[in-house]
Image (spheres, helix red, strand yellow):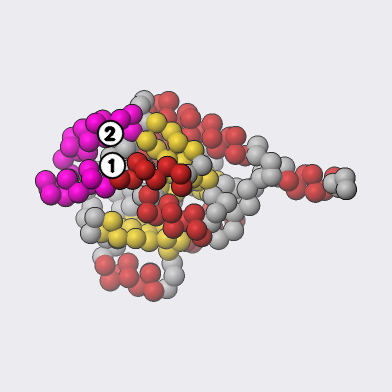
Amino acid sequence: MRPTEKSVYDQAGEGPLLVVLSGPSGVGKDSVLRKLKELGHNWHFTVTATTRSQRPGEEDGIDYMFLDRDSFNQKVREGDFLECAEVYGNWYGVPRDQVASALDKGLNVIIKADVQGAATIKKAVPDAVFIFLMPPSPEELERRLRERKTETTPDLELRIRTAMDELYQLPLFDYVVVNDHLESAVHRIDAIVTAEKCRIPSRRVHL
């Protein structure tokens, strides 16, 4: 049966995307997100809630929503997070209302998530776009983690081991972008979003 004109245009409709950017600790997710914001696109960048301590230079409500454990647990009980997980002894959660509100406005939404969080979101929202940010090499990833100097030696060694294990989670994702050069990685992610907006049939995100 020949499709109707309306059904053809329904398939080609440009609905808002939910993009999940993930990858191992130290791969450069925050740097990539900062550069993506500089592109000036009408995108919503979700601010993750966390119980970890605020680091020098970080702004509450901009880099993260910093919460104490009681406040975080209250939000968990009320179902306020699209996904939440404990990572390296601290809790992280993606606020559901932020994502839903931006999608309702027709905005593409970008979530930064660790690999565990990305897997949880994929179960809840399979039509999201999942991008794995990958280091040029395991050796380079370890170098970046050591140079950050944000963890004690035992915590650093745990992060390195976990990061190496996460490199094997590639089959979970739709795309992989190697962060060998920051500007190039940002442009590749921008190109992925552009291509997905032209996809047939278009993705339909439902929370």
| Relative to 164, residue 186 above or below | above
Q: Gap between marks 2 and 1, in whole Å? A: 7 Å
In the rendered image, residue 6, in percent from the top left (x then y), is placed at 82, 48
- Of the two numbered discs 2 and 1 on the same chain, state the one appearing first in sequence: 2
Residue that numbered label 2 is attached to: 138
User: Residue at left 30%, top 60%?
Assistant: 86
Q: In the figure, is residue 121 to the left or right of 197?
A: left
User: Residue at left 32%, top 37%?
Assistant: 27
Q: Is residue 105 visible?
A: no
> Residue 154 in magenta?
yes
The crowding category of the residue bearing disc 2, from other C-alpha atoms within 10 Å (few below 14, some 14 to 19, many at least 20), is few
In the rendered image, residue 14, in percent from the top left (x then y), is placed at 66, 43
Amino acid at pointer 1: Met
Determine whether label 2 and label 1 are within 8 Å by CB.
yes
User: Residue at left 33%, top 29%?
Assistant: 136
Q: Nearer the viewer, residue 94 or 136?
A: 136
Residue that numbered label 1 is attached to: 164
Q: Which mark is residue 178?
A: none
Q: Which image quadrant is residue 117 in?
A: bottom left
Q: In the figure, is residue 183 to the left or right of 149?
A: right
The kind of secondary structure the magenta stretch mainly shows is helix
* Residue bounds of the magenta highlight: 135-164
Q: Nearer the viewer, residue 161 or 27?
A: 161
Q: Is residue 207 visible?
A: yes
Under circle 1, the secondary element is helix
The crowding category of the residue bearing disc 1, from other C-alpha atoms within 10 Å (few below 14, some 14 to 19, many at least 20), is some
